[in-house]
Amino acid sequence: MATELATLRAHSPAGPRDIPHTVSPGLWTLGWRRLRADRVGMVSLAIVCVFLVMMVLSGTGLIAKDWAREVGVNYAPPSFLGAEAPTAPLETPSIGLGAPGGNAPLANYKSDIVDPLADVIAELKGNKPASAAGAPTPAAPSAAEEEKSVDPLADVMADIRKNEAKNATVPVQDRLATLPFGGDKWGRDVLKKTIKGSETSIFVGIASAFVATFLGTLFGAVSGYYGKWVDDFFNWFYSVFNSIPYLLLILAVAAVLQQKGTMTIILILGLTGWTGVFRLIRAEYLKHKAREYVQAADAIGASNARRMFVHIFPNVSHVVLVQLSILVVAFIKSEVILSFLGFGVPVDVVSWGSMLNEAQNELILGKWWQLVAAGTAMAILVTAFALFTDALRDALDPKLKGRVGA
Amino acid sequence: MTAYIVRRVWQMLPTMLGVVLLVFFLFNWVGGDPAYVLAGKISNQEQIDNIRRQLGVDQPYYVQLWIFIKQILTADFGASWSTNERVSHILMTRLGPSLTVLVPLTILDLMITISLALAVAYVRGSLTDRMVMIVTTVGLSVSILVYIIVFQYVFAYKLGWFPVQGWGDSFLENLFVYASLPIFIGLVVSIAPNLRLYRTFVLDEINQDYVRTARAKGVSEPRVMLVHVLRNASIPIITNLMAGLPGLLLGSFLIERFFSIPGIGREVILAVERSDFPVIKAITVYVAFATIATNLLADLTYKAVDPRVQLK
């Protein structure tokens, strides 16, 4: 963009040729300069970048590829705590603290709650120790599922069993007593699991933020640019979406879309989250469409689409970027909650939400490390991303500085 | 005033109709044939046809839409698909527990955040102010799930100060025994974002000319803050509060789920888990209507707070 502006200026007929003209820095150059001067912003940008690099490396299989390998003993404590005295092997916790579907106090839980996967887990544990990636799903024994004679997860489980062959199993006697950040129920390394979980959570957050920002920008541009009945229509559409509380809308869509998957959750978040972007972009387009440069574009015969996306869009793109950044944080949080409830990623995919779900039961047994690992990773990313967003907004729109949340 | 209200209610109708259409589109079109959801996989064609006839999904779409609108107007969504309880009965009985948690939570949250926001904005830029802002930033970044899991474990499970979960029959027992820890967690989660927001609202007012004028004529500092500034800052606060009110009903669904409080939020989760479409449909439509109504209520409250506001 900056270069485009620069070339425009270089070719502009203003001023005779012999007068040396300096190219004044564009919005992005200035924004980058201001961002560089912001120490908090740069540190948080660096942290965000570390997470992004981690996501890419883990996604391409360079790190944490063997996260599903059971390298330690069950619930191996973190190394700095030292190995646990050998005790009776821990049973799979069957107490579901706050498990859905029961009013009974905790004492009654064992009899009340039937773990829908208990059989599967027992079978898998009995036959092959390396198995059941993320098996303790939060899926409640829903009435509809219980009626089915077939196990709704049979296909998934079959897949997981097939994949087992790839994950070489560490024999029981060779397992480590401690792991750097502890192990989970199956003795998998929590550190690698957290990295793998970040990959899912961050990817979902970024992808759905792109979908939502794209929709919001498109709707906002069309609505603000054309005005009249188009504007009325989109405003109506906006107020309809806006009058259903966000989480309720997500849950309703999740209920309707029966299949679970990473794509599904990206679509759910993206299709429901565009309203905030829409409102801002619409206001920007309303403001910009009457400006002189747009009239000039009209005069040289630029089409509507060209005026909207080639002429106006670069001038509002900083708003879009800030909104994108805000949405990523919001969607990562939403993904964690959805996956925690079991409406998010499928059972064989690990995300921060599914880790927190496991951690909930582990905490009662005193195994806190998975909770701390997933919680801390998320807190660091969210803080860094939020601070970076603030810095980005200040850098791109200095007029706002000191007013909003400064 | 009356004319204004009548016109606003009239203007709400398209939005309400839109909500109805959106929900209808979601559940009757995107959701596929509910008969399969309801019958599961084992039933034969005859059973499915039977269910389809009962639900009216063998009718054309406009008839189905009419059935849906009639259901909304008469508040009769039939029976839940999984428990066979009347949907209207579900909604009525779940509202009480939700409100038992939400009303004290909202009142306490408002009192605490407004007083903190006034105090922090008064000493803006000082060490205290910056420390509070840092604490809220960090507090905001921790997932609500972590708060609930840890607090429930520490205060209820380990220390035993509160029951781990449950719900009683008497209102007072519920409020002071079962709801206190959920309310406390709700406060911890909601104070940080609200405090940041309200602080900026107060800061917007504190530098205005009228504040200087008030000080110049010798108005005491407490009076400047509590009467002059607070009254002007209350308009955005009301907007924020009102906009969040219906969402609160669901926002606390995680708390309700963890503590097994039989409220609306927990009902939504259960309904989604069980694919209990009538319950989700009813809750979505009514909560959306409530949102639209509170928006009007917010506008009317402005008028009460700020006589300069012109209702057009």
Image (cartoon, coloured by chain):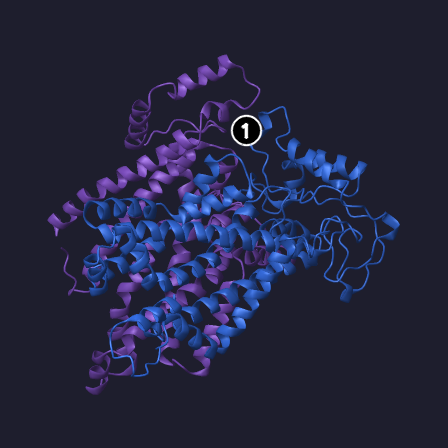
Chain colours: A blue, B purple
Pointer 1 chain: A
Kindly state the secondary structure of the residue where label 1 is placed: helix
Using residue B285 as the reference point, say whether residue B228 is left or right of it. Answer: left
Using residue A172 as the reference point, say whether residue B8 is left or right of it. Answer: left
* Residue A89 percent across, percent down from the top left: 81, 48
The answer to whether residue B116 is visible is: no
Residue drawn at the location 59% of the way across and 39% of the way down: A139
Whether residue B172 is situated above or below residue A31 in the rendered picture: above
Whether residue A236 is situated above or below residue A292 in the rendered picture: above
Using residue A128 as the reference point, say whether residue B139 is left or right of it. Answer: left
Q: Amino acid at mark 1?
A: Ala
Quadrant for the C terminus of chain A, please.
Answer: bottom left
* Residue A102 percent across, percent down from the top left: 57, 39
* Residue A153 percent across, percent down from the top left: 63, 33
Q: What residue is pinned by disc 1?
A: A144
Residue count near mark 1 (Cα–Cα under 10 Å), binned few <14, some 14–19, many ≥20: some
Residue drawn at the location 21% of the way across and 82% of the way down: B214
The answer to whether residue A156 is visible is: yes
